Image (cartoon, rainbow, N blue to C red):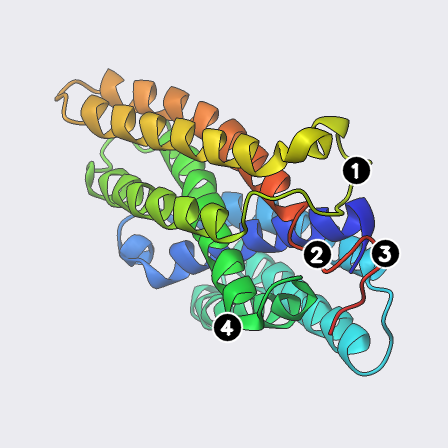
Amino acid sequence: MTGVAGVMALVLAETVAGATLFLWVSPLWTEVKRGFFKLLGAILTVLAGLTWLSVDSAVVGRFPSGDVLRATTLVAAGATAIWTLLLFARQQAAGRVVGLLSVPAWLTVLVWMGGAGRQSYVLGLFQLAAGAALLGAVTDGLLLGHWYLTDRKLPRRPIDRMTTILVVSVAVAAVAVISAGFSGIENTASINPLLTAGALAPWIALGMVLATALIAGLVKAVLKGERASAVQSATGFYYLAVVTAFTAEVAVKTRFLDSPGGPVH
């Protein structure tokens, strides 16, 4: 993959994969109303479509890897759209089955994207998994915080659990950023010139990850309060976490690709 489209394909795929994983693998199905799944599904469907468009624009290699990545992304995006439509059609059992199947579909997308990395395949896959965990946690956490405004009787357990996932994912993401190295490399300069000036990209990424860690700690502290406004305050912090986490991933993923013109391996 190559260029700005390649970087955005990586970040969008991480977001959808992580958010889908935490949505369907966690106990949320038995904790929240179906409206939350419909809300998140609608958002993920849009992001999934943008992911496929980015992949289609970024992949320069053809058969076999390029075409396989395109097809895999299209299948995963289609699965997200299908389970969302099924839930809106009140076909909950079928929607849940397709939703669970969409999890390995998106993980497969990350597996294929791992081959585009400039470092070893295993390290690249670890970096994508770490990014997916971070972006998935902040995305689901933000929307879950808003859902408390709709469902006033929802207990704190779901957002407490998501915040714990965020804390863990921040630690893993910091390791992933460090593993990418801090030396200057040829990367995608057209996103922002700061990302190539004196090899600032990894330091920006690490700083944003540490900022996200601070925010996650504040969310944890706020949620210890008993008042209902504690969740509203936590949601406000999640807004900041989305900004810092996405900035971190965009910065570090400019260094992920093999080269500005490198194909999927």
Q: Which numbered disc flags the more N-terminal residue, 1 or 2? A: 1
Q: Is residue 231 left or right of residue 239?
A: left
Rounded to the nearest whole Å, what is the CA distance between mark 2 and mark 4? 23 Å
Rounded to the nearest whole Å, what is the CA distance between mark 3 and mark 4? 24 Å
Q: Nearer the viewer, mark 3 or mark 2?
A: 2
Q: Is residue 115 above or below residue 151?
A: below
Q: Nearer the viewer, mark 3 or mark 1?
A: 1
**Which amino acid does the dot numbered 1 rest on?**
Ala
Q: Which numbered disc flags the more N-terminal residue, 1 or 4? A: 4
**Which amino acid does the dot numbered 4 rest on?**
Pro
**Which amino acid does the dot numbered 2 rest on?**
Leu
Q: Quadrant of the C terminus?
A: bottom right
Rounded to the nearest whole Å, what is the CA distance between mark 1 and mark 4? 33 Å
Rounded to the nearest whole Å, what is the CA distance between mark 3 and mark 1? 17 Å
**Which amino acid does the dot numbered 3 rest on?**
Ser
Q: Which numbered disc flags the more N-terminal residue, 3 or 4? A: 3
Q: Which numbered disc flags the more N-terminal residue, 3 or 2? A: 3
Q: Is residue 66 left or right of residue 214?
A: right
Mark 1 is surrounded, within 10 Å at the Cα level, by few (under 14), some (14 to 19) or many (20 or more) other residues, namely some
Residue drawn at x 80%, y 73% is: 66
Mark 3 is surrounded, within 10 Å at the Cα level, by few (under 14), some (14 to 19) or many (20 or more) other residues, namely some
Read off the residue under disc 2: 257
Read off the residue under disc 4: 104
Question: As rendered, which of 230 and 120 lies closer to the eye?
Answer: 120
Rounded to the nearest whole Å, what is the CA distance between mark 1 and mark 2? 12 Å
Residue 88, position as x, y percentages in the image: 55, 54
Q: Is residue 20 left or right of residue 226?
A: right
Residue 32, position as x, y percentages in the image: 32, 47
Read off the residue under disc 3: 57
SS of the residue under disc 1: loop
